[in-house]
Image (cartoon, rainbow, N blue to C red):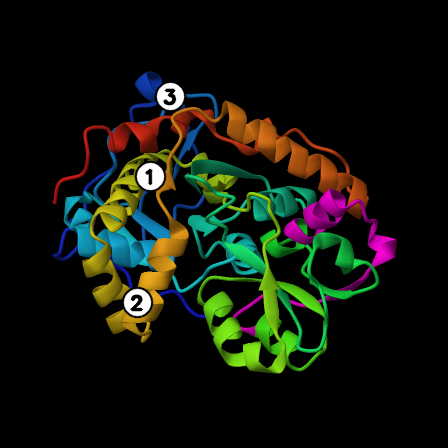
Amino acid sequence: MSPPSIPFSATGGPPVLRRRTLLAAALGVAATGLTACAGEDTPAVRLALDAPLPAEVPGDTVLRVGDKETQKAIEFSGEINKFAFEVSWANISGGPQTIEAFRADALDIGAVADIPPIHATWTGLPVRIVAARFRQDPVNHPIYQLGVAPGITVASLADLRGKRIAYSPGQAQGALVLRVLQKAGLAKSDVRLVELASTGDVYATALASRQVDVAPIGGIQVKRYQAKYARDGGTTISHGLRDDPSHLYSPVTVLEDSAKAAAIRAYVQHWARALIWVEQNPDEWIERYYVQDQGLTREDGLWLVENAGVPDIPASWTDVIARHQQTVDLLAVETGNKPLKAADLYDLRYETLAADAVKGGVTR
């Protein structure tokens, strides 16, 4: 796991240390003798999970965030200058890394798809989702496509029968594979699932070396795989399912800290405005992020922006939770884990914050 980056003041200067104001009666919180967050001299203030979110963030609060791409969006959009607390950006992403960081008390909020919160709960780590975004027209703007190894013929989902398919339990790609099999009318026994961690270009490399026949690949890996291996017979096919859930989530212990809960409340709003800024400023985003920061070509950046489509930040999580429940139920059956209520994965106090933050557009 990469070490967290050095904290900096989100307001552009050194952090201003202030004494925490304890408003227990008004906020429904109780002072505890528990150890404060690292670097703080005052004890944490425990916030009940059904208590209203505090609106004021103590000035000495540090929020540790693992979301590299949105970090840059927040910086480029100017949202970084609007924070009233300190942000420590950690080079941590994806389900396994964020869960590990949560357990080590090295991270307060992470960006993942819909599977890590389920997996965390099943492995004894209580978490809650605090923000959700999707893609408009998600079937035509998928995150993943099914990569097919050179020399293997897969023209439809029915052709997956008997194939070796890359599978990553506890990650979005793993759940997508199970949903694809369900759509195709196939059972796990009808294919051979090959467990591989879906990090970096592992899946694309496994396809190219014919370690697997099929693997879900996403982002720039789709374009690169098509360009590099098409001449050898490597292909990709659409799965026809929506695979666009993207969430921010936090451990329950973090949300019980009144200062952290208030900071997350503010962060969710800045996060939403930064996402809309990216959609409204594609040329600047491509040049500053994909080209200058990530080292991609402008053509690659343009492809990624077009493939992502338009962000959808729902004001209600009713349908979101219903879809999540379907995923929970499928995973419970396929993995043998105990069913759980998807609604229990969401902190509804944060439900409308992101959508409300982008009403009326975004200004720099």
Please state the horizontal and vertical placement of residue 35, each as a whole percent of the image.
43, 46
- Sequence-first disc among 3 and 1: 3
Q: Which amino acid does label 1 sit on?
A: Val
In the picture of the structure, the residue carrying the numbered disc 2 is 290
Q: Badge 2, how many Cα within 10 Å: few under 14, some, many 20+? A: many
Q: In this view, does 322 lie above or below 130?
A: above
Q: Badge 1, how many Cα within 10 Å: few under 14, some, many 20+? A: many
In the picture of the structure, the residue carrying the numbered disc 1 is 268
Towards the viewer: 353 or 275: 275
* Labelled disc at residue 119: none
* Labelled disc at residue 52: 3
Q: Residue at x 37, y 35 (%)?
A: 313
Magenta region includes residue 195: yes
Residue 33 visible, this angle: no
Q: Which amino acid does label 2 sit on?
A: Tyr
Residue 146 falls in image quadrant: bottom right
Please provide the residue range marked out in magenta: 176-201
Q: Badge 3, how many Cα within 10 Å: few under 14, some, many 20+? A: some
Kindly state the secondary structure of the residue where label 3 is placed.
Answer: loop
Q: In this view, does 129 lie to the left or right of 68?
A: right
